[in-house]
Image: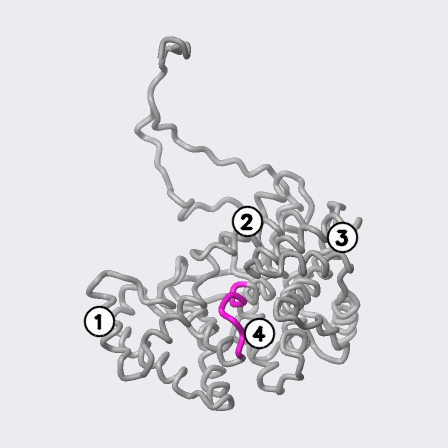
Amino acid sequence: MSEDVKINRGLKGIYFERSGVSHIDGSKGELLYRGYSIHDLATQSTFEEVAYLLIHGELPNETELAEFDARLKGARQLPQQVYDIIAATKDGHPMDVLRTAVSALAALEPDSRRVSDEAFIANGIRLTSQVPMIVAAHEQIRNGREPVAPDPELGHAANWLWMLKGKKPSEDAARLADVDFILHAEHGSNASSFAARVTVGTQANLHGAIVTAISTLAGPAHGGAAEDVMKMVQEIGSPEKAADYVKAKRKAREPVMGFGHRVYRAEDPRARHLREGVRTLSEEMGSPEWYEILQSVVEAMKPYSRHGLNVNVDFYSGVIYKLHGIPMDLYVPIFAIGRVPGWVIQCIEQLQSNILIRPLTLYNGPGKRDYVPISDR
């Protein structure tokens, strides 16, 4: 076999396509959606605005936003068969239930089978509303309760918390959930978005691509960081133990959860917007120790920042979910709720200049061999 072929394992550093959706500068710690800084979007926009921006390419005016919001709210419904499937699979992991339910929607909703820009937008808007409904319904059903009906008066994030917990969230809690969704909405050619593009490359429909994306996000190497951080915080237990914990981890050459990222050398630009949210929410919920532990870990990790080990977005998000009393196995589904618009626009982009994605592998097995009949082996 050829010895001069360069292998880029994990396709690291490989550009496979052009994209006008998000720009990531890992050395500067910069993230733009459609040219807009994540800092401006996280502080001034809503998830609905950001979803519109990602899908349509421009920020909406008031009329466009109202129409888009009406479409999202109008899509807050699931076929009864999906609730039956959730009930039948209620003991499964929430990501498995979510994947199964979205796959069922592909079979139950005829419009899901259409493959075009217009169909992907319509189905994408519907899925943006249906995914949080599925996650919330599963949480209710597995705890022996009836699903909570959506509230048309509430925005996307507030309605999600209402359906999940059965009580109206405070304005601050709803806003923090909204920011969390904004920060997770899109992130270039990450594993799940790339997997969705591979699916669309075969001319499959959007639902098939979203099922692929959910399956990929379910892997702990992609979507599991927030859960791992929460486990770490519980293991540390108190702020004064953080320094010794970090020292022991570094000495053993083991990772400290929530630090480092495949594309960022500087601090993940999304992290700062959840940091303050954790502080205020932890005080509101009467559990300030969670924030204090996190900040003690950050302080202990400062000497390693020059090696690119800076805090990432998932460092804070897990504690936010914990403070809401959300079970750990829902952390990745929450990531999926925010990421749906990003998956949708990645699929639309792929469709617009579609090509079958088919990389090569360099064979390194045995050379050509003579076949031996089974009687002579």
The residues tagged by marks 4 and 3 sit, at their Cα atoms, a distance apart of 26 Å
Q: Residues within 10 Å of mark 3 (few under 14, many from 20)?
A: few
> Which is nearer the N-term, disc 3 or disc 2?
2
Identity, as a three-letter code, of the amino acid under mark 3: Glu
Instruction: For marks 4 and 1, give the one nearer the viewer.
Output: 1
N-terminal-most mark, 4 or 1: 4
**3 or 1: tag closer to the N-terminus:** 3
| Inter-mark Cα distance, 3 to 1 | 53 Å
Whole-percent x, y for residue 109 in the image: 78, 52
Start and end of the magenta stretch? 325-332
Residue 101 location, quadrant = bottom right
Q: Are marks 4 and 3 in contact (CB under 8 Å)?
A: no
Disc sitting over residue 18 in the figure: 2
Q: Which residue position holds label 3?
A: 118
Rendered residue at 58%/47% (across/down): 197
Whichever of callouts 4 and 3 sits on the residue coming sooner in the sequence is 4
For the residues carrying marks 3 and 1, which lies nearer the camera in this image?
1
Q: Disc 4 marks which residue?
A: 41
Q: Nearer the viewer, mark 4 or mark 2?
A: 4
Secondary element at image label 2: loop
Quarter holding residue 269: bottom left
Mark sitting on residue 247: 1
The reply to whether callout 2 and callout 1 are in contact (CB within 8 Å) is: no
Numbered mark located on residue 309 in the image:
none
> What residue is rendered at 66% in x and 57% in y?
88
Was residue 40 drawn as part of the magenta stretch in this picture? no
Pinpoint residue 246: horizontal percent, then vertical percent.
26, 72
* Labels 4 and 2: the sequence-earlier one: 2
Counting the numbered discs, the total is 4
State the separation of the CA atoms marked 3 and 2: 21 Å
Q: Residue at x 77, y 51 (%)?
A: 108
